[in-house]
Amino acid sequence: MHLEILPTLVIVAAVGLTAALGALATNPQSAWYLELVKPSWQPPGWLFGPVWTLLYALIATSAVIVWHSTGGETRRELMLLFAVNLMLNLAWSALFFRAQSPLGGGVEILLLLGSIAHLGWRCSSLSPVATWLLAPYFAWVAFATILNWTIAILNWEK
């Protein structure tokens, strides 16, 4: 195998693993989730899978571009930021769905949103394309932050 493709495969595998573990941690059919009061403007359940599939593809593409656009300490730092971001991404599903904590998820998603913003800012001087590929991820998580906090507030007494 050509060594240039190995980092791409590792990045795609890491993002794919995050997606798979996140899907396993998420259970929108659980009795707990179905009983939550949700806002009328929440997107339909079927939309989340396709949106996240696209977002994960964009995250992986951004990370691959950054890998091939950098080297040395800068590359190491940025790959660490991508890794931390993926861990925060997965942590939200665990907190919201597995721990059944909209409040915990709400606090954590603020860290995730900050991580995406920081990652985009750090990538911006290296690759505008890599940065713009993260923009839909930021927008969706910003929306998800509002949704998460709305659900937390609507279910405060539960």
Image: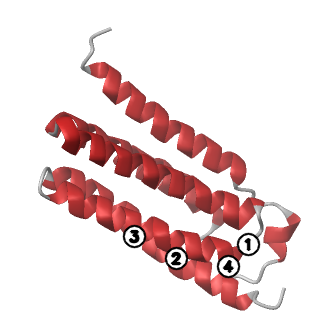
- Looking at the picture, tell me which residue is in the foreground, 22 or 95: 95
Which x, y percent locates residue 103?
Answer: 67, 79
| Amino acid type shown at disc 3 | Gly
Whole-number angstrom distance, CA of label 3 to CA of label 1: 20 Å
Badge 4, how many Cα within 10 Å: few under 14, some, many 20+? some
Residue 46 appears in the picture as rendered = no
Is disc 1 placed on a helix, strand or loop? loop
Is disc 4 placed on a helix, strand or loop? helix
Whole-number angstrom distance, CA of label 3 to CA of label 2: 11 Å
Q: Residue at x 39, y 34 (%)?
A: 11
| Residue at which label 4 appears | 103
Badge 3, how many Cα within 10 Å: few under 14, some, many 20+? some
| Residue at which label 3 appears | 114
Judged by depth in the image, the label closer to the viewer, 4 or 2, is 4
**Which residue is situated farthest in the right direction here?**
31
Callout 3–callout 1 Cβ contact below 8 Å: no
Q: Counting residues from the N terminus, which is met first, the one under dot 3 or under dot 2? A: 3
Q: Counting residues from the N terminus, which is met first, the one under dot 3 or under dot 4? A: 4
| Residue at which label 2 appears | 145
Residue 58 left/right relative to 30 = left
Whole-number angstrom distance, CA of label 4 to CA of label 2: 11 Å
Q: Counting residues from the N terminus, which is met first, the one under dot 3 or under dot 1? A: 1
| Amino acid type shown at disc 2 | Thr
| Residue at which label 1 appears | 101
Q: Counting residues from the N terminus, which is met first, the one under dot 1 or under dot 2? A: 1
Q: Residue at x 55, y 45 (%)?
A: 19
